[in-house]
Structure formats: structure tokens, C-alpha cells
Image (tube, rainbow, N blue to C red):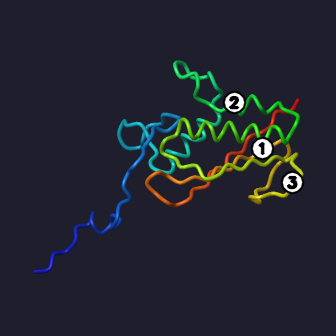
Amino acid sequence: MVTRPTRAESISPKEKQGEFFSDFLNSFAKTPIGEQLGRVTNEKAVNQSLRNLIKTNVGERLYQPFIGSNVNASLFDNNIEYQINNLQFFIETTIRNNEPRVNLVNVLIESSLDFNTSETNVPINENEIIITIVYTLINSNQEITLTIPLLKRVR
């Protein structure tokens, strides 16, 4: 006797990727079906968390005064070489201390005012800093690249 798959089995993917990490959406938007909060899973959840950590200033979160990277405070620096080294140190330290789901591989920072050769070949607008984070998740060996553009404040 041959059993035919049900309609749900034929439409569903054969191998469902497991949910290892999940977070709520930053906007707290509801899902279209039901009254549940929308959420992101796995790589998207970690990317959202990394963006939040980098854009948070130290002391900005109540009862968690040491979380953040002070990236916004360093956007006023005039010395580009010092600024890039400073940003790289703050970002690496923040990720290593506050994101246990990530094994950090590399942090690259490029500026439109940096006259060195570009390593990532990302087009840079004027007064923009581009942060590129390369990492692996703790349960995977696949490298993931996250690019975060920051606009430099104009005086």
C-alpha cells in the first residue's frame, strides 16, 4: 500500500531549519495573522542585536550602564586614523562582552576621508563611515558579513 503525502507535507520544505535564536522586531510590529508580536530568528536576530549594540551609547540603557559602543560620540573626531582605530576597538570590545552568540572574525571600518585602499569595495558617500563585521554563529562555521553605514556628522 502506497501512502500519498498530505497537502501540507507536499508544500512544506523537506528540511526545516531549526530556530536557534529569536528576538522581537525592533518596531514591535504585530504579525499579519493573529495578535502576536513579530519576531526575527537565527542570523537576522543576531544582526539586529549587533546593530542595536553598535548604535547604543555607553550609559544610555537604564540599569545596564556598560552596554554600548560610543560610536556616535566618536563621529566628531577630526583625526581619521585615530578615529578608525578607536571605533574598531570599541566595536570589538562591545561584541565580545555583550553578544555571546557570536564568534567575531574581523571588524573593518572605512571612511570617505580615508585615503588608503578600500578592502571591501563598498561604495562610500561623503561623510560616511562603513562598519563591516565578519562573524560566525556559535553553532555554525559559516561566516556572516554585516555592513552598517553610519553618517558622519557635518559641522
Q: Which residue is mark 1?
A: 129
Between marks 2 and 1, how big is the CA–CA gap? 14 Å
Residue 6 on image: x %, y %:
22, 67
Q: Which residue is mark 3?
A: 116
Secondary element at tag 2: loop
Q: Which residue is rendered at x = 42% and y = 46% of the image?
A: 21
Report which quarter residue 75 is drawn in.
top right
Residue 79 on image: x %, y %:
88, 36
Between marks 3 and 1, how big is the CA–CA gap? 14 Å
Residue 69 on image: x %, y %:
65, 33
Secondary element at tag 3: loop
Assess disc 2: are there few (<14), some (14-19) or many (≥20) residues with their C-alpha within 10 Å of its C-alpha. many
Q: First in sequence: mark 3 or mark 1?
A: 3
Pointer 3 and pointer 1: residues touching (CB < 8 Å)? no
Residue 9 on image: x %, y %:
27, 66
Apparent side of residue 27 relative to residue 118 in the rendered image (left or right): left
How many marks on residues? 3
Closest to the observer, 85 or 20: 85
Quarter of the image with the C terminus in it: top right
Q: Which residue is rendered at x = 62% and y = 51% of the image?
A: 146
Q: Which residue is rendered at x = 55% and y = 36% of the image?
A: 97
Report which quarter residue 5 is drawn in.
bottom left
Closest to the observer, 57 or 3: 57
Q: Which residue is rendered at x = 39% and y = 49% of the image?
A: 20
